Image (cartoon, coloured by chain):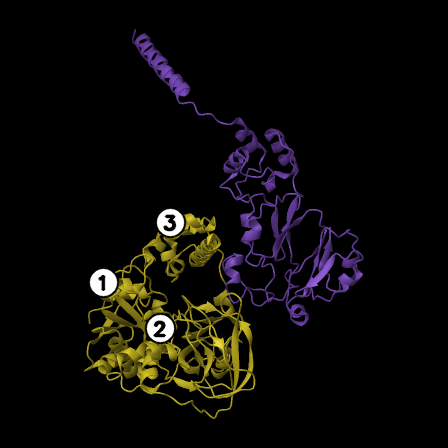
Chain colours: A yellow, B purple
Amino acid sequence: MLTKTFKRGIHPLHNMHEGKGQTRDLKTREYVSDTVVISMAMNIGAPAKPCVKKGDHVDIGQVIGEAQGFMSVPVHASVSGEVVAVDSIPSLGAGNVQAVTIKNDFADTWVELKPLGSVEKVDPSLVVPAIQAAGITGMGGASFPTHVKLTFQAGATCDTIIVNGAECETHLTADYRLMLENSTRIVDGLRAVMRALNVKKGVIGIEDNKPEAITAMINASKGREGVSIRPLKTKYPQGGEKQLIEAITGRQVPSGGLPIAAHVVVLNVGTCAAIADAIIDGKPLISRICTVTGCVRKPANLLLRIGTITEDVIGECGGYSETPGKVVFGGMMTGICIPNDQMPIFKSTNGIVVLNEQQSRSKDESPCIHCGRCVAACPIGLNPYQIKVAADKSDFAAAEKLHVMDCILCGSCAYQCPSRRWLTPSFKYCKDHITAEAKAKAAAAAAAKGGNK
Amino acid sequence: MTILYAGILLGALGLIFGGVLSFASKKFHVEVDERVAQVRECLGGANCGACGYAGCDAFAEAVVKGEAPINGCAPAGEKGVKAIGKIMGQEATAGERLVARVLCQGENGIAKERYQYDGYQSCATAAGLAGGPKDCRFACLGLGDCMDKCAFGAISMKDGIANIDPDKCTACGQCVKACPRSAIKLLPVSAKVIVRCRNSDVARVARTVCMDACIGCGRCKKECQYDAITVENGFARIDPDKCTRCGSCAAVCPCKCITIE
């Protein structure tokens, strides 16, 4: 089979099946906990506003948080039961976010659903609004609202929809299990989007370390108009949006641009399945597959309700097998370490990886030896060691000149570095600072404009 | 002979170029106000940008042109401002010298730790990760963003808290800008009695996140005979104009968050 790929990149944990061995053959099973804490800020953009109050009874799928503007999606109850609290919890980012706590009554009563019917017959103009109403955000990790991705500015054209089944992250097998167990739904979701955007070509890219998934997806896409499967080389970060576009279409996304500049829209397999659920069954996004692995007694692929608390999930997996050092949401390369195990899972939590104390100890950095391995690893083609020099001096102008804003924070350079330099965190520091400064400047300019009037 | 020719040639060239240069310097002479250089001498010299100009040179030029106030350079101090006033022939008084103060005492062990942070050593990065490693959302994170910015070496880190040396501080304000928690404020140097907490949460919450948090109980306000203390938003503030540095408030504070120097 001819496999495609992008330039550079790395092979993390190559000799141990990318760390996926623990869970790749385990069937997904459902786990429902008795309490869920549903965060209102699960998407990039404006957080939703809670519209239920303490003591209310909610059914599954009921809107509990209303979308605030275009760059926002509603939040739905993932269990039926009584709302026990509407308060603020610490978010994964800065500050606190509003959250709704629901006590599950296990009656599993649904709100009245409004299915739109078969994806091949649905009115294309209804698809994107249905996606927003179902609260769908990118389920690969970045949680960008999907309807925003599917709404282009005037003049932009799209000729290919790429579905990301690469799952290049180490340890995670959630997308792999979804492709095996629910392959038709993924193709249905892709077809719905293709019809909504009037795009003739849909490509599902899958890394070649998942041959079973490739076979399953080929079988599911038989007889579906315009859908093809593209095996990809196993390499990190193959599932990065820009890398996937380069591998499949040979086009490059321009610096600072969005995929639509390369006439492509990229969706995760999980997002596609959620879109199919929203169109065919009318079901909002209330659950997702999550790989729980690392130092837990019984690693598993679990179908979890959004808002399930990490402690409960770990308990369902037999508890910690060693003293935990870090608990990471997402994979090892791009995941975010959570502050404590009271954190609820989000729409984008594709994995929970538990590290023991020894694994989570960070090493001190040594001086750069100018070996150039980071340059050879960077999938974007940046010079990480130079940017790091600028970052250490907090010289943000120099870092910006070295295109730090194009960094996708994949961590390839830091993984390869023999001196264990803290490359990726320092780039994040630069990116955050530059973004904040640009925002402040824009706000000041807007204020000055208002003042002149 | 060869040496002689070379000497004559170079000498002649030197004379010609010298003549051209002296002519050019007369012809294209630009009138430079000598006061700019003199004013520049009196400034702090760190190019900190606190005055709002591009650097010390730009500020000196603006002062001579009369665009910038004479006492606009905080690092110059009282002495510097007087010197500039002399140069410009104006009466100038520096406002009272300000110093940057860290309004937090939440050292390691006193402020409750939310999680152990061993990532990139920057307060801004840590503050963006689950709200920062300290439970209090007003706390100094102690990773040294202000220390990196300080051009005068006035800031040091101890036990997870920034310490500012008031003698070295020139009130340029770079640390105030750098702090993601806004835990640093510029206060008059005479304000020796300081409430070192800005936690505006209700007392119950404030107390659970930090042993030294101001709970807004108002005992200091009752104790103060000069009406210098107000309790707003759940924490106390001292008006430096009314405060007589008697220290009675610090004596009664149950949380030990009022300090006297």
In the image: residue A228, left or right of residue A32: left
| Horizontal arrangement in the rendering, residue A74 relative to residue B45 (left or right) | left
Residue bearing the label numbered 3: A401
| For residue B145, above or below residue A188 | above
What separation in Å lies between label 2 and label 1 (alpha carbons)?
A: 24 Å
Dots 1 and 3 on the same chain: yes
What is the total number of numbered labels drawn onto the structure image? Answer: 3
Work out how far the residue at label 1 is from the one at label 3, CA to CA, in angstroms.
Answer: 26 Å
Q: Mark 2 points at which residue?
A: A146
Residue B183 numbered mark, or none: none
Question: In the displayed structure, does residue A295 sit left or right of residue B104?
Answer: left
For numbered disc 3, what is the local secondary structure? Answer: helix
Residue A47 lies, in percent from the top left, at 46, 71
Q: Earlier in the sequence, mark 1 or mark 3?
A: 1
The chain identifier of the residue carrying mark 3 reads A
Q: Which residue occupies 39% across, 71% down?
A: A70
Mark linked to residue A250: 1
Query: What's under tag 3, amino acid-wise?
Result: Lys
Furthest-bottom residue in view? A107
